[in-house]
Image: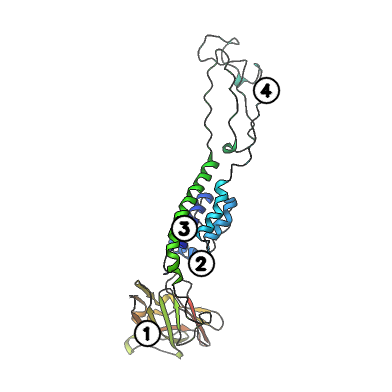
Amino acid sequence: MGRRGGPPADLWGLGATLWFAVEGAAPFDRGGPAATLAAILHDPPGDPRRAGPLGPVLLALLGKDPARRPAAPDLQRLLEPLAGAGPGPTVPLRATARLPADGPGWQRPSGSGSSSASGSGSRSAGLAAPTEVLAAPAWTRPLPAGPSPPPARGSAAPAPPRRRRRWGRRLLGGVGLLVALLLLANALGDRDRSAGQDRPAGRAGAAATPGIREPAGDGQFEFVVRSVRCGLRRVGPELARRTPQGRFCLVAVSVVNVGTEARDFAAGQQRLFGADGRRHSVDAAATAANGSLQLLHSLVNPGNRVVGTLVYDVPPRMRPARMELHDSPFSRGVTVDLG
């Protein structure tokens, strides 16, 4: 949104990374870049279904207001109990009785009914491998204690048990690593905290909606609606004259880039609302014919200004109520009262 970056932005990135790690999907993915950017700026992340005790932490990190995200020391205190928690309760394995020699066909050796004590590759008809009752997920089950019973003579040696993956411990170890990184982020945050306190708190009375001839800021742009005039039936010179479907409303604006980087101004992002709440978009052809071609799209460098008149084709009885002016397609915009 054109604001200065700092530790809150880094903590937001940490929250988005953790969300992807535990939920398996990005929190604001909408299938396309424009929709995803709009969701990042305006939509809540949703309900974390797999995060468990991390859920409230993730929602706090992904808050829209940087000032309301937890600071690095507070986040450290939230994550330390999670990093130090042990694995969940486990259920011990239970072995069943061994099956007799005349069990199902898939347990009997092929060929004759007698087994050779010296034959290689033949299976034992008298013993079967013990089976397990899997009463818990694989990553929570402990390995069976004690030595395994020796294989019967003539039977193939059992395969060594596969090493079970300790996903729970790995996840907790990863959280512990993140806590260590947060200690570094805390040190960096202390350095930038004073700079953040020096930022301007905004104009006095910013809570009130600005009106005509009053400055209104969104992102890097400061707008001033200088006048509104409605009722015209044509605009432009004779050879390029434009006539409306209803009537034209002309909104004279001044736009100044008060930021530190160049920014594109586009007329299509500036909306006119009637008293009935309906939104009206700018008439690009009429705006150009009226002599404000520069307002259709201009790159405004820091400190520079563009001035002109936006033209809207509105219904005959439409009464202008407010303007919604935007620094970019994805900004929240600022409202100017036209009453």
Q: Position of residue 292 (x, y in %)?
A: 35, 83
Q: Is residue 155 above or below residue 265?
A: above
> Which of the two labelled residues, at mark 1 and mark 2, occupies the earlier sequence position?
2
Query: Would you say 72 lies left or right of 92 here?
Result: left
Q: Residue at x 53, y 64 (%)?
A: 43
Nearest to viewer (mark 1 / mark 2): 2
Q: Residue at x 38, y 74 (%)?
A: 259
Task: Give the Cα distance between marks 4 and 2.
Answer: 63 Å
> Which of the two labelled residues, at mark 2 and mark 3, occupies the earlier sequence position?
2
Type of residue at label 2? Answer: Ala
Task: Give the Cα distance between marks 1 and 3.
Answer: 47 Å
Q: Which mark is residue 308?
A: 1
Type of residue at label 3? Answer: Asn
Under tag 3, what secondary structure? helix
Q: Which mark is residue 186?
A: 3
Q: Is residue 138 above or below residue 171?
A: above
Type of residue at label 4? Answer: Ala
Query: Would you say 320 lies left or right of 95 here?
Result: left
Q: Position of residue 30 (x, y in %)?
A: 49, 59
Around disc 2, counting alpha carbons within 10 Å, would you say few (fewer than 14), some (14 to 19), or many (20 or more)?
A: few
> Which of the two labelled residues, at mark 4 and mark 3, occupies the earlier sequence position?
4
Q: Is residue 307 visible?
A: yes
Query: Would you say 236 lies left or right of 131 here?
Result: left
What colouring style does the render use?
rainbow
Task: Give the Cα distance between marks 4 and 3.
Answer: 58 Å
